[in-house]
Image: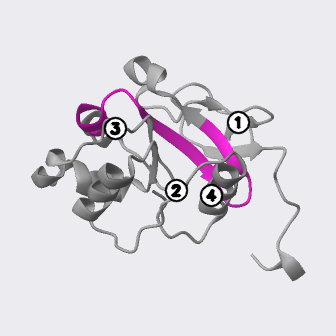
Amino acid sequence: VSQSRYDGGGNTTTVSLLNSGGTVVLGTQVHPEYIMRMVEKYKVTCLMLVPVLIHMIVNTPSCSKYDSSSLKAVMGIAAPFNVDLKEKAVAFFGHKVWDLYASTECGPTTSLSPSMFKNKISSVGLPMMGTTVKVINESGDECQPHEVGEVYAQTLSLFSGYLNGIS
């Protein structure tokens, strides 16, 4: 199930799934029970949702009545996925929850896999293949552990800029 999206994630995932012989289920509603009903009906194996939809599902008691055993991966994407919600998602879906950090400009940047949740749940995971990630402070220096800064990423898919310099 892929939610309606404005960024590259939905398109990339959809095209990849179709090219590998997969089936894509496009929903027509943004409602927790509807999503879980589609998971059960179509035996969905990969669910990509913004964290607010994961929040809605895990906090809607009636969602637990749907069979989600077909799911192999539940991916939180396109927005911050806080620790409390990650823990609730694992309690609801089991150890198949991922946190994917990406941007339209860079593409996939980091991935926190289910095996990393136990020890690194407050993290966004490790850089994807071909990706370099740094956290830079206001002085432009790389941050020390636990220091607040801005994320800088360089990926193989990073584009050079917007048309006519529009930002």
The residues tagged by marks 2 and 1 sit, at their Cα atoms, a distance apart of 19 Å
- Tell whether 64 sits left or right of 93: left
| Image coordinates for residue 153, horizontal then vertical, percent | 73, 44
Q: Earlier in the sequence, mark 1 or mark 4?
A: 4
Q: Mark 2 points at which residue?
A: 78
- Tell whether 111 sits left or right of 109: left
Q: Residues within 10 Å of mark 1 (few under 14, many from 20)?
A: some
Q: Name the residue under label 4.
A: 14
Residue type, mark 4 in image: Thr
Q: How crowded is mark 2: few (under 14 residues within 10 Å), some or many (20 or more)?
A: some
Residue type, mark 1 in image: Lys
Q: Does the magenta stretch include residue 77?
A: no
Q: Earlier in the sequence, mark 4 or mark 2?
A: 4
| Image coordinates for residue 108, horizontal then vertical, percent | 67, 46
For the magenta stretch, what is the residue range? 89-110
Relative to 30, say whether 113 is above or below: above
Which residue occupies the foreground of this view, 147 or 2? Answer: 2
The residues tagged by marks 4 and 3 sit, at their Cα atoms, a distance apart of 24 Å
